[in-house]
Amino acid sequence: MISSLNSFFNADLIAFLEKLGLRTKIERGGRVFPLSEKSIDVIKALEKNLNNNKVVIKLNNRVTKVFTDKNIIKGIEFQDSSKVSCTSVIIATGGLSYPQTGSTGDGYKFAKELGHRITDLKPSLIPLIVKEEYVKEIQGLSLENVGVKVLCDNRTLYEDIGEILFTHYGLSGPLILSASFFVSEKIYKNKKAYIKLDFKPYLTYEQLDKRLLNDFNLYNNKHLKNALKDILPKKIIPIIITLSHIQDDKKVNMITKEERKNIVTLLKNFSFEIIGTRPIEEAIITSGGIDVKEINPKTMESKIIKGLYFAGEILDVDAFTGGYNLQIAFSTGYSAGYHC
């Protein structure tokens, strides 16, 4: 990615969009959005640029074949058998994610027919499915400032603090999508993986135990379920109590030190076994694609077929969440367009 990023990086992209009349803004974390906060405005700006440069756009014309002669691009064929002769073709058909946008895998088929190797296609930046059935009881619950740790083979694959969302099948939200980037391949290889949530990541075990003890003193004559309301969302309290093996109607003044410590451990290590991901159609990006060893990194041109270029998610290049995959698409697209 070094060459294409050097040719057209994030500042270049912002300047390009501004030149097209699309004003942008930078929010916390360096995230860039249209000032209008409408994604359609990005499309309108790009479409206006195409029209100004008299680019012909053929909508609803599905390409079925890219044809060559002696490993040189000669043209493309449409579904109605009509053809267009050309000396350059850029395949930028995306991955297998979001098929409703047209990314149905046609690009992989064209590339394979032309001799390119396709690496394993897997979902990435995708919600995770967990084994524990009780997750259904807290579906819809969204939490901020939660610590997340993903483990596989006794090794930490990912660790961060942020926002998560419980669903009927498992876990989602920004932090989980980020975590999936590191764990989806392990799941694909049928390895056991686990995710641990820390509901109070900014407190140590000792600090949390002290906080819980203070709450217990405050609600000394209350039932346990009522004494946890200041430290946990109401929806998750019954699950914590069940996992702690303490009766929910037990009075706080009857809770032993060991039982309290057990609750603290649960709050710091709320664990799930990851058993899968949602379908690739629901993934933000597709991991895998055209083997980059077969592509010139400076031009994005195929090393196998002269005049054939690739750009975007169809390549076996994927990144962390945070706009990086969009930048990859723009940067490789710029390189391919400039050199074809």
Image: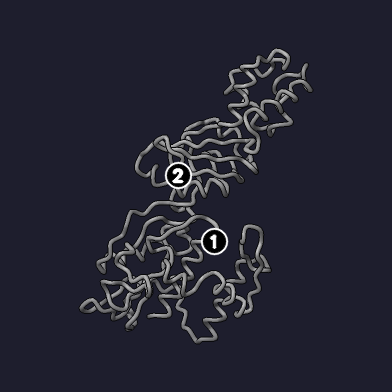
Residue 87: image quadrant is bottom left
Disc 1 marks a residue whose amino acid type is Gly
* Camera-side residue of 145 and 53: 145
Q: Residue 323 carries which label?
A: 1
Give the camera-side residue of 180 and 95: 180
Query: Residue 49 shows which numbered tag?
Result: none
Compare residues 126 and 281 and report the one nearer the observer.
Answer: 126
Look at 64% across and 41% down and name the residue there. 143
Q: Estimate the x, y position of residue 80 in percent, counting from the top left.
A: 35, 75
Image point 57% across, 77% down: which residue?
Answer: 16
For label 2, the SS is strand
Q: Can residue 20 be seen in this view?
A: yes
Give the residue number, with chain letter if any, for mark 2.
Answer: 277
Above or below — where is 244 with respect to 276? above
Whether residue 80 can be seen here: no
Above-or-below relation of 282 to 275: below
How crowded pointer 1 is (Cα within 10 Å; few <14, some 14-19, many 20+) is rated as: few
Q: Which residue type carries mark 2?
A: Thr
| Side (left or right) of 216 relative to 265 | right
Q: In this view, does 37 lie to the left or right of 324?
A: right
Q: Which residue is drawn at 75% across and 24% down?
A: 214
Label 1 – label 2 distance at C-alpha: 21 Å
Q: Which of the image's four quarters has the C terminus?
A: bottom left
Furthest residue toward left = 70
Which percent across, then down, holds residue 189? 34, 43
